[in-house]
Amino acid sequence: MMQVGTSDTLNVSAVLFSDPQGVGLPTTLTLNEYKLTNGFYQSTTNVSMTQTTTTTWQGVNVAMWSATIIRTAGDYRWIYTSCCRGIHTNASSSMNSSFTMGLDYQKSSVPNTAPILMNLLPVNWVVGDTAQSILFAVDPDGDSVLVEMDDALNQYANGTFVPLSPFSQLGNYGMYNVDTDGTIEWSPSQLGQFATGFKVSEYRNGSLIGVNRIQQVFLTQNGSTPNIVNFNPLIQVDLLNGDSVHYATMISNATSTELIMPGVSVTQMSNSTWSLDSLQFGTYKGVLRATSNSSNMDFYVNLVVTSTIGIEENIGYRDMEYSVYDWYGRYMGTTLEGLNGLFVIRYANGKVEKVFVR
């Protein structure tokens, strides 16, 4: 969900997964809309969405639907329900149960975008192996994001979400943990098909403004899990703005890999090497995923560009405006003449450089 500026226009999207041998994915999708009125979510209208993209992921079909709607300020809830899900190891009568997901969203005059999920959760896990996946949720507005485990949902009735019942959480089938940063760790103890859910909550100034209820099916099987040897989660570099750095790590049992890092141009050189290009001063967070035919392994990777010390040729032009600051942030004027030591130059076009003058 994304609010367009401070307008009443909202762009809403949904992503669904489907077994190629099971229920097909429709070309249009209908969301039931509710609005918080007098302390209760009350049904208002339906939202019709159009399929925009399709792909495959670990043997399942994936599709996205989108729609543009106009809504005034308020607390909204959008629900999607589809019957029926398949037989699950951790749920009885699951063949007759519906599949429900929902999004709570606070619409105000302040621009707000719900957290964006940067990668798909896996379908396949290996019995007896401890693996981790990361529900990588990034909020474009800078709001805080909290991830929690949730029940598999059966339906939305009488103003509340109804859990799939009887339902057993994944912790009953091997060690299972969901960290608030989205790291999901599981060591499945038996073969089967498992339903589960996650909540992605969005906070602004300490107040809850949105919850995305994600439903997921995990399939356990025999096989091998990728392994990253001597993994280094921190890349720390000193370089000029616009420079690049190579990141490499040793990966085994992987058929493919992917590094996602919002705000950074990432070029994949090989299954174990990436070039991080056009870097600027700052701190960035990404996820490295290694995938095999039977499982995957995710790790958070942090990039810290601590300074931009160096000499860059042909950076000055007659008409270029800039301001000079010393190492402590004190303004020194618009020229380097007569100065000695390390200085920060801020150009009118927003570019920042650290230079040493002698």
Image (cartoon, rainbow, N blue to C red):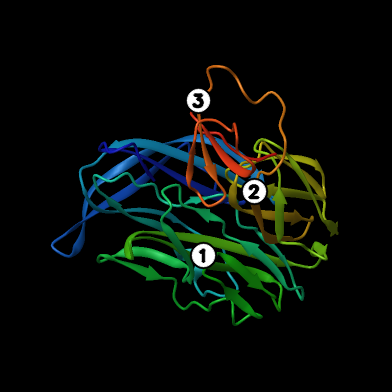
Q: Nearer the viewer, residue 87 or 261?
A: 261
**SS assignment at label 1:** helix
Q: Earlier in the sequence, mark 1 or mark 3?
A: 1
Q: Which residue is mark 3?
A: 321
Whole-number angstrom distance, CA of label 1 to CA of label 3: 68 Å
Is the residue under label 3 in contact with that under label 1 (CB below 8 Å)?
no
Q: Which residue is mark 2?
A: 307
Whole-number angstrom distance, CA of label 1 to CA of label 2: 57 Å
Residue 60: give x, y in percent of width and height.
64, 49
Mark yes or no: residue 53 visible: yes
In this rendering, position of residue 352 left or right of residue 98:
right
Q: Earlier in the sequence, mark 1 or mark 2?
A: 1
263 w.r.t. 42: above or below: above
Label 1, residues with CA under 10 Å away: few <14, some 14-19, many ≥20:
few
Residue 269: give x, y in percent of width and height.
81, 40
Q: Which residue is mark 1?
A: 95
Amino acid on which the number 2 mark rests in the picture: Ser
Amino acid on which the number 3 mark rests in the picture: Glu
- Seen at 59% across and 80% down, the residue is 171
Label 3, residues with CA under 10 Å away: few <14, some 14-19, many ≥20:
some
- Picture quadrant where residue 212 is located: bottom left
- Seen at 80% across and 61% down, the residue is 226
Mark yes or no: residue 253 visible: no
Query: Of circles 2 and 3, which is in front?
Result: 3
Residue 340: give x, y in percent of width and height.
64, 41
113 w.r.t. 69: above or below: below
